[in-house]
Structure formats: C-alpha cells, structure tokens
C-alpha cells in the first residue's frame, strides 16, 4: 500500500467561534515542538478561492456550493496534497464540515453537497468548535461580520444545529472528530487537546498514515 507521511487537520465551526485564532495557535504550538506545519484556509488564497471569497455575498445557493467545491479540488491538487506528500501537518481553517453547514444555510441539500465533494481527501482529524450562541453573537458584534451569513442574528443558533448534523455525517464517514467548546477553553488549551489527539492518529505527528480517504455517500 502507498502511504503519505503528512497529517491533515481541519478546523470548522460557526463564524465568530475562534477558528482563525485556533489555527494560528495550533500552528505555533506544533511548530514549537519541531513539526513542519502548513496553515491554510478555505476558500483558499488561490484564484478560485479569492473569487469565491470576494463574491460570496452575491453568489448564493447551488452556484456558490459549486464554486466552493471547485476551489477545494484546486486547493487539494495544488497545495494540500503536495504538502501532505512532503510530510507536513496541514491545518485548514474551514473544510467539508463548513460546506455541510454554510451551504445548507442557503438550502442546498446535503446529498448534493456530498456528491460535489466525492473524491476529496478527508481529514485525519476534523476539529469542530462550538460555543453558546450568546458567546458567538458577542464575538461577532465585537469583530464585525465577514459575510452575509454572519449578519443574520439567528445565524449562530442555526449554524450550531447544522454543525451537530454535520458531525453525525462525518462520523458516519469514519472521520476522526474532536469537538471543542471555545467558550470554556483558551486557544492554547484547545491546541494542546488537538495535539494530544494527533499523537493518537497516524501522520507527521506520529507514524505514517494510510492513503487519503474519500467521501463515500
């Protein structure tokens, strides 16, 4: 069996829950312990991702879902998979779990989203962040909304419910999952918990891991 030496970690959760802060903290935490870490995000910084990020307020529904998926395949081919093949730990701010939530906010059915993502590399560890809706709402009010979904006052509660559904879907795919409440833990504490989980997973933080998993519907 061919094996890749890298480890793929994704961090998802509602807007304002602290994903970007945790990705930065986790990257620094692992780098400080001698690991090669590549932090990235979706939509990516590549051309399709930049277009998607710029126009996410204007493009909706199925069209936006297709753009997000197109960016993901490009991101995988040109950035994520090469880094994994080189033995890096790749930490991605938003991935499949976010698709199963954000595009569902636009009423795109889950089976359609899974079909769009058929063949993607699944993470070795999917981290899903949660917090109480008032905590998320306060953080959004403090930093400001980044896109149309975050301007909806009902969005935190809706996203949390959809993330619960998304975690069930990921578990059904046998994706290792770690749920963290950022309302009760600091970014440093969360990073340490993720690192402990990674030592139990194959990859660059431990031994080599199997070939990339793919979405199975």
Image: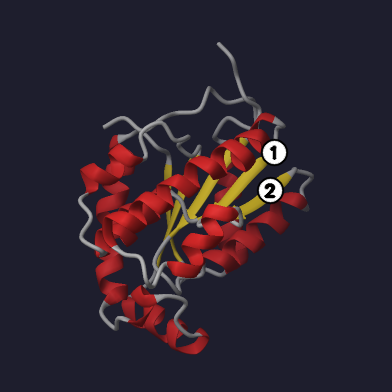
Q: Which of 203 and 115 is in front in this view?
A: 115
Crowd tier of the residue under label 2, counting other residues whose Cα lies within 10 Å: few below 14, some 14–19, many 20 or above: some
**46 lies above or below 118:** below
Q: Which of 94 and 24 is in front in this view?
A: 94
Tell me what residue is drawn at x 50 percent, y 69 percent.
54
For the N terminus, which image quadrant?
top right
Count of labels in the image? 2
Residue at mark 2: 38
Mark 2 → mark 1, Cα distance in angstroms: 7 Å
Give the image location of residue 212, x and y in percent: 50, 28
Tell me what residue is drawn at x 66 percent, y 27 percent.
5
Q: Do the residues labelled 2 and 1 touch (CB within 8 Å)?
A: yes
Give the image location of residue 70, x and y in percent: 45, 46
**127 lies above or below 56:** above
Give the image location of residue 58, x and y in percent: 37, 71
For the C terminus, which image quadrant?
top left
Crowd tier of the residue under label 1, counting other residues whose Cα lies within 10 Å: few below 14, some 14–19, many 20 or above: many
**Mark toward the start of the polypeptide (2 vs 1):** 2
In-image side of 58 versus 115 (left or right): right
Is residue 46 in view?
A: yes
Give the image location of residue 43, x and y in percent: 51, 57
Residue at mark 1: 88
């Amino acid at each position: 069996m061919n094996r890749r030496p890298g480890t793929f970690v994704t961090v998802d959760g509602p807007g304002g829950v602290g994903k970007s802060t945790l990705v930065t903290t986790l990257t620094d935490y692992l780098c400080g312990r001698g690991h090669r870490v590549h932090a990235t995000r979706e939509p990516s910084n590549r051309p399709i991702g930049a277009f998607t990020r710029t126009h996410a307020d204007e493009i909706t529904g199925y069209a936006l879902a297709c753009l997000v998926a197109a960016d993901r395949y490009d991101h995988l081919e040109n950035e994520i998979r090469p880094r994994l093949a080189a033995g890096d730990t790749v930490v991605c701010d938003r991935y499949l779990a976010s698709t199963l939530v954000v595009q569902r906010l636009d009423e795109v059915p889950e089976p359609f989203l899974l079909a769009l993502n058929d063949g993607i590399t699944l993470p070795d560890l999917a981290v899903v962040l949660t917090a109480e809706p008032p905590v998320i709402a306060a953080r959004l009010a403090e930093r400001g909304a980044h896109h149309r979904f975050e301007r909806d006052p009902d969005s935190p509660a809706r996203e949390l419910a959809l993330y619960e559904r998304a975690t069930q879907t990921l578990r059904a795919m046998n994706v290792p999952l770690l749920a963290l409440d950022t309302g009760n833990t600091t970014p440093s504490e969360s990073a340490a918990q993720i690192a402990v989980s990674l030592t139990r997973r194959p990859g660059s933080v431990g031994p080599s891991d199997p070939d990339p998993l793919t979405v199975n519907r």
